[in-house]
Every structure is written in structure tokens, then in C-alpha cells.
Amino acid sequence: MQNLYVAKFTHQKHWEDFSTKREVYPIAIKESHQRWYLIALDKKDEKVKTFGLDRISNLIVTDTKFKPIRYNVEKERISACLRCRNLFSCRKSSTRIC
């Protein structure tokens, strides 16, 4: 993440029977309730999303660099928690679990 390389991976949503290929700009790795998450900007729709690390496979760190993203993970997390009391179960927050 510090080196600002684009990442590609396959992601399996917890509630769906199929997986999707993602290309993202990694922002941070965070822990919540003993689970680890990748917070990243999804290139597909330019939204910041949260991906459970246990649902990521076929990870490739490319040699393509991206410009730093101005995103305050702690501030966004607090805002989301105030709206719904639990960031990682809220699908309407600006930081969503995917």
C-alpha cells in the first residue's frame, strides 16, 4: 500500500454464489471484530469499499502505480458508525463491505 501499486484479485461475497474480479487502489488494512479487511478504491465504480481478506483469492500486486488517495479511514469509520452503529454491517455507508 505504501508503494501505491494497483492490486487485482478475485472476491467472493459472503452472501452470493459467484465471485468477481476486482482491480483496486489499496488504501488500508483494518481489523474489526477479529476480522481483517482491505479498504480500497474500486476502479470499476470509483467507490471506496471494504473487502474481507478471507474472501480474497488470486491476489496480484501489479507494477502499475496510482496517485495517493486522500481518504481518512478513521474519520469515515466514525461517520459510518454514527449513522448505523456498525461500519461493517452497514451497506449504505460510504465505506461498504463488498
Image (spheres, rainbow, N blue to C red):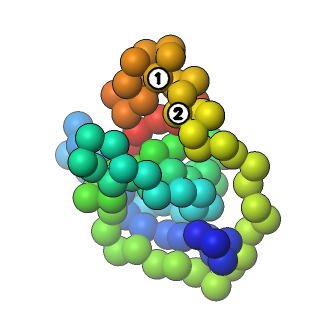
Q: Circle 2 sits in a helix, a strand or a loop, which is it?
A: helix
**Amino acid type, callout 2:** Arg
In the image, residue 35 above or below residue 59? above
The crowding category of the residue bearing disc 1, from other C-alpha atoms within 10 Å (few below 14, some 14 to 19, many at least 20), is some
Q: Position of residue 96 (x, y in %)?
A: 47, 35
Residue that carries the numbered disc 1 in the rendered image:
81
Q: Circle 1 sits in a helix, a strand or a loop, which is it?
A: helix
Quadrant containing the C terminus is top left
Quadrant containing the N terminus is bottom right
In the image, residue 84 above or below residue 90? above
Q: Position of residue 82 (x, y in %)?
A: 50, 16
Look at the image and tell me whether residue 82 can be seen: yes
Please tell me which residue is depicted at 33% across the width and 54% down the height of the picture: 36
In the image, residue 30 above or below residue 56? above
Name the image quarter holding residue 26. bottom right
Q: Describe residue 67's horizontal placement relative to residue 13 as left or right.
A: right
Name the image quarter holding residue 56. bottom left
Kindly give the residue lying farthest to the right in the view shown: 67
Q: Describe residue 24's horizontal placement relative to residue 9 as left or right.
A: right
In the image, residue 25 above or below residue 14? below
The residue lying toward the viewer, choosing from 44 and 57, is 57
**Amino acid type, callout 1:** Cys
Q: Where is residue 9 in the image (x, y as percent from the top left)?
A: 42, 67
Residue that carries the numbered disc 2 in the rendered image:
77
Mark on residue 35?
none
Is the residue under label 2 in contact with that under label 1 (CB below 8 Å)? Answer: yes
Please tell me which residue is depicted at 59% across the width and 43% down the height of the picture: 73
Look at the image and tell me whether residue 92 can be seen: no
